[in-house]
Amino acid sequence: MARFKYRMQNILKLKQKLEDQSKMAYANQRRKLTIEEEKEQKLKDEKNRYEEEGARLRSEKLNVREIMENIRGVKTMGILVEEQHKAVEREEEKLEKRRRELEKVMKERKAQEKLRERAFRRFIQEENAAEGKVIDELTSYTYGNKRKETEHEG
């Protein structure tokens, strides 16, 4: 039996390589997003700590300086949290872009794999047809020789 050789195998390999690269880029972007989300959570926790401290300061003996510092701290943390939230949104957009790119290259690779599969099925059909033809020829040859032998005997 002949050996199957897909003539666009190099394209399939390229598509697989592009998919692998896209998966890596997606994973890296996912890591960046996670880091930004963790930063945001830390800032929110810090802001909450400032707010709790502010509540404690207001419930004790009033110290205006500490209360003012706390209010500034809460405002600053609010600004930082908002900025970090925007950074998280930017990273989410980048991640979504990477996801779409990954989806596109995966579709392209799958299309190439389907083409390869069709080519292989066609190859198998051609091989089966060729094999059938050889068998038919052998059968005809064998049958023809047996007829000649019986004619010579008689």
Image (cartoon, rainbow, N blue to C red):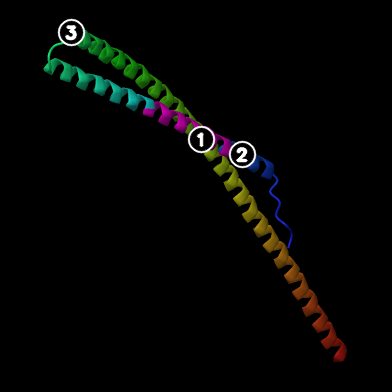
The three-letter amino acid code for the residue at tag 3 is Val
Secondary structure at numbered mark 2: helix
Q: Nearer the viewer, mark 2 or mark 3?
A: 3
Discs 2, 1 touching: Cβ within 8 Å: no
Q: CA distance from mark 2 to mark 1?
A: 12 Å
Secondary structure at numbered mark 1: helix
State left or right for residue 142 relative to residue 8.
Answer: right
Residue located 67% across and 63% down the image: 128
The three-letter amino acid code for the residue at tag 1 is Leu
In what quadrant of the picture does the C terminus appear?
bottom right
Q: CA distance from mark 1 to mark 3?
A: 56 Å
Marks 1 and 3, the one that precedes in the sequence: 3
Find the magenta span and give its range.
20-38
The three-letter amino acid code for the residue at tag 2 is Lys
Q: CA distance from mark 2 to mark 3?
A: 64 Å
Q: Is residue 51 visible?
A: yes
Residue located 82% across and 80% down the image: 145
Q: Quadrant of residue 11?
A: top right
Q: Is residue 100 visible?
A: no
Q: Which residue is mark 2?
A: 17
Q: Nearer the viewer, residue 65 or 113?
A: 65
Q: Which residue is mark 1?
A: 102
Q: Nearer the viewer, mark 1 or mark 3?
A: 3
Percent across and percent down for residue 15 are 61, 39
Residue 63, compared with residue 31, is above or below; it is: above
The stretch drawn in magenta includes residue 17: no
